[in-house]
Image: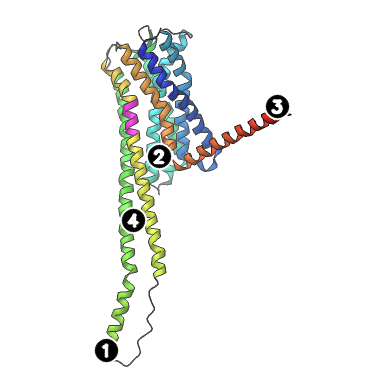
Amino acid sequence: MASTLITVLVAVCMPFFIMGIIGNIGVILCIFVTPSLRTRTNAIIISLATSCLAFLLMVVPFTVDSFLHSSWRVASWYCHTTAYLAFGFIGITVCNIAALSVYRYFCVVHPTKLFLKSIPNVVFLIVLSWLIPLLTQTSLATFQIAHTEYNQLYARCVVIKKGSPTVYNGLVFGGFLSTLAITLFSYAGIYRHVRKSTNRLRKQAQIGAQRCSQPDVQTGQMINTDAETGTSSTPNRVRAPDHSRARDKRPKSSGATNKHTKEQNYLTKICVVVFALFMVCYGPIIILSAVYAKDDFPADAYTVCTMIYWLGSCLHPLVYATLQPQMQKSVLRFLRCCRKTHSENKVTSVAADMA
């Protein structure tokens, strides 16, 4: 039977796994049902949610069962399959995150280059996000860089390195660090671009405010000049400055500045959350796999790191979805509809019982 540590970990993490399954399904349904959410950015989020959902359904339940019973109780071939699927879905999730950051970089920093934001480019990014991890896993097995083996200590099949671990570590670390660098570079570029745009709009707003106050001064100079000439001509009628136009212009500049400021804060939040999830969820298992060349890492450490990177599949789509205001409204609308349907069904059943 399972140790106390594993039992506690499973009890703590199980609500997150259930929430992850429901959340990923909810994200996919909300995007498909709501026309305003059918954007190219959300197409990548659907790809991300699909990979996380597939991992939670195809790998996690069977591995949890093996942890709790200290043995693999399903077909042995599927034990070896889950070992490849686990790292494969991790790679797909990480690549989807990098693809999402790259596409947002194209949209914000290069808005005039339409081919970067085109549908074929989005499809290319999604296909690449799935193809690279799958080809990497296939290469590991084909070229005998690693193989799967059942380990009684972990009660599941794990990927074992063959010969020198340099090639395996290079693929694992190279893939992880490259996607992390792409993601951070993209969001850093977006943040820098939005910050420059915000400062430029603030300067334009200040210049506009100064120009709105200049007509009064110019009117005074016109009257003085006519007085100094000593001419008997009647000065032209001076039209009072139209302050209503000034008031109309200021809110627009201020509104644009506030909009960019909110977008800047939003992107800053995205950067922090993405970096934290990268390091917290996937960092421990990657480091553990690289440090122990013989895959003889402690069982408790392996279990803890496995549970942590599982949480990434539960949290990533939810983080991206909840940080989008449109997605928040759609999710709340979806929950209200479900609640209303449940209430109507309950009333109908009560009425049927009374009849």
Q: Mark 3: give few (<14), some (14-19) or many (20+) Cα within 10 Å.
A: few
Amino acid type of disc 1? Thr
Amino acid type of disc 4? Leu
- Kindly state the secondary structure of the residue where label 2 is placed: helix
Look at the image and tell me in which quarter the C terminus lies.
Answer: top right
- Of the image marks 3 and 2, the number of the one nearer the N terminus: 2
Residue bearing the label numbered 4: 201
Residue bearing the label numbered 2: 103
Residue 274 drawn above or below residue 63? below
Q: CA distance from mark 3 to mark 2?
A: 55 Å
Residue bearing the label numbered 1: 229
- Of the image marks 1 and 4, the number of the one nearer the N terminus: 4
Q: Is residue 205 visible?
A: yes
For this rendering, which residue is in front, 334 or 345?
A: 345
Q: Mark 2: give few (<14), some (14-19) or many (20+) Cα within 10 Å.
A: many
Image location of residue 303, percent across then percent down: 35, 15
Image location of residue 25, percent across then percent down: 51, 29
Give the residues drawn in magenta, as a range. Answer: 274-281
- Of the image marks 1 and 3, the number of the one nearer the N terminus: 1
Residue at 32 percent of width and 31 percent of height: 276
Image location of residue 88, percent across then percent down: 41, 22
Residue 34 drawn above or below residue 144? below
Residue at 45 percent of width and 39 percent of height: 41
Q: Mark 4: give few (<14), some (14-19) or many (20+) Cα within 10 Å.
A: some
Q: Quadrant of residue 237?
A: bottom left
Q: CA distance from mark 3 to mark 4?
A: 65 Å
**Is residue 141 highlighted in magenta?**
no
